[in-house]
Image (cartoon, coloured by chain):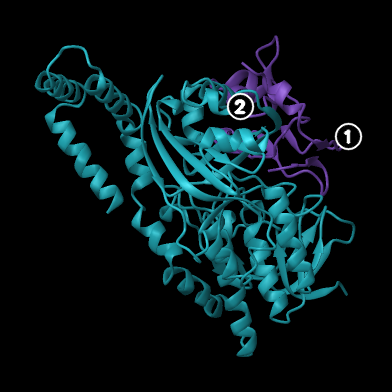
Amino acid sequence: MMKVEQKLFENRYRIDEGHGHVAIREPEICRERCTTRSCTWCCPAGCYGTDEDGGVVLSNDGCLECGTCRLLCDEFDNIDWSYPRGGYGVLYKFG
Amino acid sequence: MPEKFDVIVVGAGPSGNAAAYLLAKGGMKVLQLERGEYSGSKNVQGAIMYAEALEAVIPNCRRQAPLERAIVEQRIWAMDDRSYVGSHYRGESDEGAQPNRYTIIRANFDKWLSRKVREAGALLICETTVIELLRKGNRVIGVRTDRAGGEIHADVVVLADGVNSLVATTSGLRPPVKARDVALAVKEMHFLPREQIEQRFNISGDDGVVIEMFGKITKGMVGTGFLYTNKESISLGIGCMVEDFKKAGVSPNQLLEDMKRHPAVKPLIAGSEIKEYSAHLIPEGGYNAIPAVHGEGWVICGDSGGFVNAVHREGSNLAMTTGRFAAETILKLRDEGRDFTAAHLRAYRTALEDSYVMKDLKKYRDMPGILHHNRQFLTTYPELLSRAADTFLKVDGVDKRTKEKTIKRDFVARRSRFGLVGDAIKLVRAFR
């Protein structure tokens, strides 16, 4: 089985340091109220993981900008999602 | 005083490019805004391109377009865990006739189409994300971008910003896209020497094969897998409804990895080098999920308007056709000296209704619901079909009548007589 991280390594990105375009609004909601945490398996780039306290941690770096997490989190609307600033983010070579 | 254009086109995918090209050709002052480094750098598709829809925008352009392979063979596979029952259609175009469908690599194709748009006279500004629409009362009068002093005015705005449709949603022109109405697809680009692809798929020259797969590969979720041959690569992907991923607890990457291990898929990609992994949403809610497509000073096209025929796996043609209709509507109003009000832009909706776009979407309007509530079409039946084929083709001393009875018993045991008749009716209704 090929891991997502290995695959993302093949992609081209232009990272916008310090300007994450996706953010968790209230970490407590993920930790205390969300029971599904479907972002941790549905994100095709594996951007979401869980930490030791049972919270959800997000890393923007491998984001493929698909928008899935935004739709998953419809119950709590706890993901602040926008596209990266113009020119940044994933740059598909083939698409 | 901010700069003013006749039209602003948001997005440089097939829909935005078709609209911008025709508007510029028609003599309008067009600004096209694209958030990627170039047209195509944010775009993902299988990808199949339909020549008729393209050449309705730019006549006789296919010789210049970066096409991969002309599709001469279509395979549809109903997959069980280690087998499939399939139907194949192979047909060369008649002498002198041109192929109808081609595989493409979107980054190459979009770049080419974008060059045509600029040659036609449109101003393309890349690396610029549109944040929201500018309004005066109800009327859309321009856009605000993420660039400094990024307010730009126009008489009419064409929204072609893709499936997430953030601009229209943020501006309240449409309800948010819902998890039950979109599929998430993941795809890998597998590179292989040209000769190997041609040997493996029984093709030569620039002929190509596409395979659409459904059944157990989606683990009970509503979705499909695909394998498309390009010149020196294979596009391999799988997609399912976002809501189903959420409920099933399956990761998209796991799904793709399992599909790659299927005995029918594995040898086709053996020894390939993966050079890209992509993910994209596909609006598959069909007719019932199409939002309002026009209003005061705006129209919406392509994926952002939900224009995908999921049953036939068509999207790029609907994108280009809706972009073309938007442009034709705007040009006609300009010629008649009429304003871009919602009442006048209604002609865009009418053009969609009169064409294959809305007719096909309407035809399959119940399909998303039927598949949602009848998973047996994606799980039980592919399995039953495979078992039936296995039983019937195995030569093991059992007589054929007994084999027929075994197969029949198998079907009735799994679905009941009543269930089988019900499923047949549902299937006929869904495709009617």
- Residue B45 is tagged as none
Residue lying at 71% horizontally and 78% vertically, measured from the top left: B25
Q: Which chain is cyan?
A: B
Residue lying at 55% horizontally and 68% vertically, measured from the top left: B294
Q: CA distance from mark 2 to mark 1?
A: 23 Å
Nearer to the camera, B259 or B220: B259
Question: Is residue B255 in sight in this rendering?
Answer: no
First in sequence: mark 2 vs mark 1:
1
Expressed as whole percent of the image width and height from the top left, the position of residue A51 reads 70, 13
Alpha-carbon neighbours of circle 2 within 10 Å: few (<14), some, or many (≥20)?
many
Alpha-carbon neighbours of circle 1 within 10 Å: few (<14), some, or many (≥20)?
few
In the rendered view of the protein, which quadrant contains the N terminus of chain B? bottom right
Chain letter, disc 1 residue: A
- Residue A39 is tagged as 2
Expressed as whole percent of the image width and height from the top left, the position of residue A89 reads 79, 40
Expressed as whole percent of the image width and height from the top left, the position of residue B228 reads 55, 41
Nearer to the camera, B104 or A15: B104
Which structural element holds mark 2?
helix
Which structural element holds mark 1?
loop
Question: What is the three-letter code of the residue carrying label 1?
Answer: Glu
Instruction: Left or right? Give the position of B98 relative to A89.
Output: left
Name the colour assigned to chain A in the rendering: purple
Residue on which disc 1 sits: A17
Give above or below for A87 relative to B234. Answer: below
Residue lying at 46% horizontally and 74% vertically, measured from the top left: B350
